[in-house]
Image (cartoon, rainbow, N blue to C red):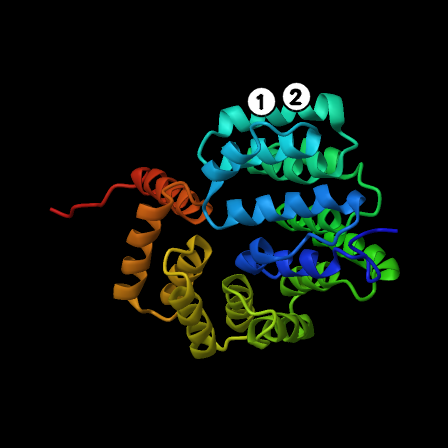
Amino acid sequence: MDPFSAEGELLTLHNTFHQGQYQAVLDFDTSSLSQSNVIPAQVLKLRAQIATGDAQGVISSVQQERGPDFAAVKAFAHYFSGDNAGATKQIEQLIETSSENVTVQILGGIILQANGRTEEALSLLSKHQGNLEAIALITQIHLQQNRTDLALKEVSAARKWAQDSLLVNIAESWVGMRVGGDSYQSAFYVFEEMAQTPSSTSTKSLISQAISEIHLGRLPEAEAALNQALQNEPHDIEAMANAVVLATIMGKTAEQQQFLEQLKREKSNHALLVDLDERNSLFDQAAGKYSAKVSS
């Protein structure tokens, strides 16, 4: 039986992780788990530790561990500690020897995609055997490729056999926000329920709610959700990035600059900043082709 299925004993831990409740994952009691589920639970706890900013602590704690699961987590921790080259080398070696391991597939797929190696990431993730996180990642990659058709196909297939899955709901909502129309409202309902329910609320779900509010044109509501997210975690990178976008849309120049400078301090290579730099460079190149005419 799949430990993450509706009947599996890791379902609650799995959902808690993907709701972004990382401290709750770290506090989760795993003492009564069956032996076969101990390592999957440890992997989720280590990933939660990385998500809370303690990648170095994870690297230290898995030094003496053996097996591809812990090796993949170690590579993942190195990536989040800033050692992209080392992490990529480690994950490449693991793919050569353990590409059928689900932890290698998931964490390896994330690292490969982060390095722009999309086809390799998809190839690795496609080896999964009914793993919902792999499906969610494949969906996310297709959306980054602007292949909404493939993303929709992925979640539609998963919906047939994982009807009540939280991850499928989330992935379907990502696709819905790309499709638009009535799908914006459907996505909002999913994220709002997660963000406003005490048992599932988190900074991550508040950001998702805010993004869906932006798509619906409800800017004050989006601002309230982002303010709550930043109040919970003032240094959350994604909350800052979305605050930059929202302040720009709302014409709040001072706030936009404030969040932009904060984002630069926290993560200078964030995708939003890289994109802005590229666009500014392209604008300067285009402007350089023209010179002002001076009349005599």
Q: Residues within 10 Å of mark 2 (few under 14, many from 20)?
A: few
User: Which residue, as the protein is rendered here, is positioned at the far front?
Assistant: 31
Instruction: Tell which of 232 and 261 is nearer to you.
Output: 232
Q: Is residue 288 above or below residue 148?
A: above
> In the structure shown, which secondary structural element does the residue marked by tag 2 occupy?
helix
Q: Residue 94 location in percent, x, y?
A: 68, 25
Instruction: Tell which of 259 and 39 is nearer to you.
Output: 39
Q: Residues within 10 Å of mark 1 (few under 14, many from 20)?
A: few
Mark 2 — residue?
93
195 left or right of 282 in image = right
**In which quarter of the view is residue 157 placed?**
bottom right
The answer to whether any part of residue 193 appears in the image is yes
The answer to whether any part of residue 141 appears in the image is no
Instruction: Tell which of 179 and 124 is nearer to you.
Output: 124
Q: Residue 292 location in percent, x, y?
A: 22, 45
Q: Residue 259 location in percent, x, y?
A: 32, 58
Q: Residue 197 location in percent, x, y?
A: 59, 76
The structure residue drawn at horizontal position 69% and vertical position 56%, both measured from the top left corner, is 14
Disc 2 marks a residue whose amino acid type is: Gln
Q: Count every numbered label the image shows and give the total.
A: 2
| Residues at circles 2 and 1 in contact by the CB criterion of under 8 Å | yes
The structure residue drawn at horizontal position 68% and vertical position 75%, both measured from the top left corner, is 182
> In the structure shown, which secondary structural element does the residue marked by tag 1 occupy?
helix
Mark 1 — residue?
89
**In which quarter of the view is residue 244 placed?**
bottom left
83 left or right of 255 in image = right
Instruction: Tell which of 42 and 228 is nearer to you.
Output: 42
Q: Is residue 93 above or below residue 189?
A: above
Disc 1 marks a residue whose amino acid type is: Lys
Q: Is residue 222 above or below residue 280?
A: below
The structure residue drawn at horizontal position 71% and vertical position 61%, both measured from the top left corner, is 12
Q: CA distance from mark 2 to mark 1?
A: 6 Å
